[in-house]
Image (spheres, grey):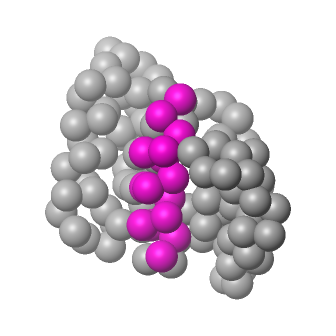
Amino acid sequence: MVPVMYYFRGRGVPKDEAVALDWLHKAVDTGSDEGSYVALPQLGMYYLYLRNDAAAVECFREAADYGSEDAQYLLAECYHHGWGVKQDDTEAEKWYHESQHDEGIRKLPMRATVSCW
């Protein structure tokens, strides 16, 4: 999925968000593990970048239900800040906790990534 981000940011290739978005949608539409686990959270982050918070929440929720720790963390952030959902600290805490059931190795980089978009 990293090459998709190159298109979003124009690193090593011409910046082309339409191409990047097309590749993300293709990955999601495959129904593969990578589509559900990796591409959906990235697509959700792009929707946050566009300020389409409701679409972002849909992506995060689907991937979170699939078990993506990144999506669970991002869904918690949405509830904490009220992005695309009613602000709800109880629901946020539930998803923060869920995101740490696995080792939580990617939590810090993901937090940084959210602020980079």
What x and y, as percent, mark residue 112? 73, 42
Q: Is residue 85 left or right of residue 82?
A: left
Residue 71 vertical placement versus 77 (above, below): below
Q: Residue furthest front?
A: 86
Q: Residue at x 43, y 55 (%)?
A: 59
What x and y, as percent, mark residue 117? 59, 31
Q: Residue at x 22, y 68 (%)?
A: 31
Q: Residue at x 18, y 63 (%)?
A: 30
Q: Residue furthest top?
A: 14
Which of the 4 image quadrants contains residue 38? Answer: bottom left
Q: Nearer the viewer, residue 83 or 17?
A: 83
Dominant SS in magenta:
helix
Q: Is residue 24 left or right of residue 72?
A: left
Which of the 4 image quadrants contains residue 18? Answer: top left
The stretch drawn in magenta includes residue 112: no
Q: Residue furthest bottom?
A: 101
Q: How many marks?
A: 0
What span is colored magenta in the figure?
A: 51-65
What x and y, as percent, mark residue 13? 33, 21
Residue 92 vertical placement versus 50 (above, below): below
Q: Is residue 13 left or right of residue 109?
A: left
